[in-house]
Amino acid sequence: MKRALIHDGRMQSILAFSFLSGYILSFVFEGQILYSLLELHNVTASGYIMLAIAAQFLGLFTGGMYTKSAEQARIVMFFGLGISLITSVPFFFAPSLLWGIGLAAGAYSSGAALAAWGYFLKAFTPRQERLRTCADVLIGSNIIMIALNLLSTKLSPFLGLALVVLSLLLGMACIWTLNVQPLSQESEAGTSRAQDNLRKGVLLLCLFVAVLTINSGLMYHVINPAFAHLGELTVWYWSVPYIAALLVLRKLPARIKHSRMLYAGMAGIVLAFLGFMFLGRDALSYLVVDTLLLAACGVFDLFWWSILGGLLDFTENPGLIFGIGLSANVLGVLAGGIIGLWAAQHRLTAEVTVLGLTVICTTLGILPLLNHRLVLLLKTHAYLTAYTRAGEVTHAEYQAKALDPLTAREQEVLEMILTGKSNREIAAALNITENTVKTHAKSIYSKYDVRSRARLISILLRGEDL
């Protein structure tokens, strides 16, 4: 019964997120529908765009601060969708003060709703499957965005806006019927050391994301406008390489490490900026630049989204961690957008390329530090390179660390814990029940005087004192 509830909840939460994110991508966050409406009324776009991005950042950053349970997350997300719907209505009419107010309110409330979704990612998707769930919501959001953008461009921006309203209504229906009552939000990391690792990991991840997504801001305000004359091609093809990259990564077996894909993604961004500088502004050049850049964006987005998903198990407030992580992305886009607007005004193509390459060099420097910090918590994550001592700890070292000797079965369970296997996977491998695995795990924790797996791993794989 509970498994069916979780499966249905996973699907409902994915749909709700996709409908909300489709609204964000097609409207408030550099959306084609917003651009079309502003152009239709001859309104300067830059002020509205920066206002929306800043409000979205605030919504993401603060949303988790007042969302303290799964039920509260459902309420925040429902009303976030509702406020976004209401604040879209003024855009059916002529420009007025309500446009700015509505855009800021819609961007903030949708940002808070995205942060709250972290509860549902943790509750409805096991850790080892969160990479796929993150891929699903990113793919679904972009498919909805492409459909809305095409209809807005080919037919009418008001039709696109009407479909945005419909999308928000569907998202509200998914959240309203979502059953979160039986769900618990337990945290695996109870020690101060584990919490310290979590804080440092989140801070490094936010720094990595904020720096990297400066290139996304440059893409929105320098690269995309340079190819705007190609019309419909840029509307429908823009996210196709992004979706394709996510589909490929989603289907890779869990045993295959994705870490090398990060360097392939960095190479793609480098080649995209070089192509933008040296190639022309024809359709073929656009296909080359956009394919390289957006495929790389898909690789990196799935990287840090899935890392955030894994970190949710180490906190009692997943909305806070998830929201702060996503806000780093928006902050990077905002910074890149400001730089991009200035560069576009002064026609600084070569300088933009140099900045893009500098961003990649900086993230290359951050990546090893980030990997080292995250692997202490997420040792078996597909994107991370495992800690090198994992295979070097001997049975004698295990016993020497323990306060009381381990039994043979506890030794087997411990070795599997240190390889990152879940209770379910350990039970299947040893042909015992999950409850038996939990009993052995509690005994092991007691003998090492720890309260969580994270602390146990820190002791045995990092050599920390008991």
Image (cartoon, rainbow, N blue to C red):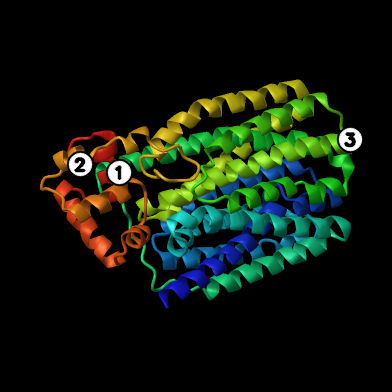
Q: Secondary structure at mark 3?
A: loop
Q: Residue at x 62, y 23 (%)?
A: 358
| 458 lies above or below 435 | above
**Residue type at tag 3:** Asp
Looking at numbered disc 2 in the image, what kind of residue is underneath it? Tyr
First in sequence, mark 1 or 2: give its number: 1
Q: Is residue 292 above or below residue 439?
A: above
20 left or right, relative to 425: right
Residue 253, visible in the rendered structure: yes
Give the labeled residue for mark 1: 194
Q: Which residue sits at x=49%, y=57%?
A: 129
The residue that mark 3 highlights is 282
Image mark for residue 81: none
Q: Earlier in the sequence, mark 2 or mark 3?
A: 3
Question: Height in image: 188 above or below 387?
Answer: below
Which residue, given by chain and number where applicable, does mark 2 sit on? 398
Local crowd size for mark 2, using a 10 Å CA cut-off: few (<14), some (14–19), many (≥20)? some
